[in-house]
Image (tube, helix red, strand yellow):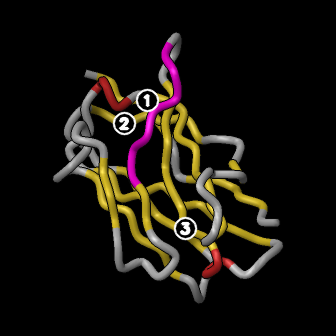
């Protein structure tokens, strides 16, 4: 199994950028597809972006497409989420998640990092 720790959250103004990191440990990182999810107060957790184990395939929620970029460095066992042109509606706790290659679900989750965007 893999353990995940997010970092990089904070308080920024609308239009600013942030880069979130997700450090993985415990198993071979390249065996896992990865994803970012977020949960705003009073709302359900929602998908943000996903990345294949090799990094060659990505997917994004429509709400972040063109503004967010997901990437990974398998040599550093780390995944990233570059967030540009942030909006107040991006305010949420952001979670990284890992899905083993043959699994259909994200089985491993980090503890989350808070992102707050002020208007």
Q: Nearer the viewer, mark 2 or mark 3?
A: 3
- Give the residue at mark 3: 33
Residues drawn in magenta: 43-49
Task: Determine crowd level at label 1: few under 14, some 14-19, many 20+ residues with C-alpha closer than 10 A.
Answer: many
Task: Determine crowd level at label 2: few under 14, some 14-19, many 20+ residues with C-alpha closer than 10 A.
Answer: some
Residue 10 is a magenta residue: no
The spot of residue 101 in percent (x, y) is 61, 71
Determine the secondary structure under disc 2.
Answer: strand
The residues bearing labels 1 and 2 have C-alpha atoms spaced at a distance of 6 Å
Vertically, is 62 above or below 59?
above
Q: Which quadrant is the C terminus positioned in?
A: top left
- Give the residue at mark 1: 116
Which residue corresponds to the image point at 63% horizontal and 69% vertical from the top-left? 102
For marks 3 and 1, the one nearer the N-term is: 3
Q: Which quadrant is the N terminus positioned in?
A: bottom right
Q: Nearer the viewer, mark 1 or mark 2?
A: 1
Vertically, is 47 above or below 25?
above
Determine the secondary structure under disc 1.
Answer: strand
Q: Which mark is residue 12?
A: 2
The residues bearing labels 3 and 1 have C-alpha atoms spaced at a distance of 27 Å
The spot of residue 79 in percent (x, y) is 52, 67
């Amino acid at each position: 199994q893999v353990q995940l720790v997010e970092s990089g959250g904070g308080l920024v103004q609308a239009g600013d950028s942030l880069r979130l990191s997700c450090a993985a440990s415990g198993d071979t990182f390249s065996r896992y597809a990865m994803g970012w999810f977020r949960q705003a107060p009073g709302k359900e957790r929602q998908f943000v972006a996903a990345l294949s184990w090799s990094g060659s395939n990505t997917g994004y929620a429509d709400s972040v497409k063109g503004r967010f970029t997901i990437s990974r460095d398998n040599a550093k066992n780390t995944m990233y989420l570059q967030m540009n042109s942030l909006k107040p509606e991006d305010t949420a706790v952001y979670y990284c998640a890992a899905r083993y290659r043959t699994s259909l679900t994200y089985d491993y989750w980090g503890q989350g990092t808070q992102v707050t965007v002020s208007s």
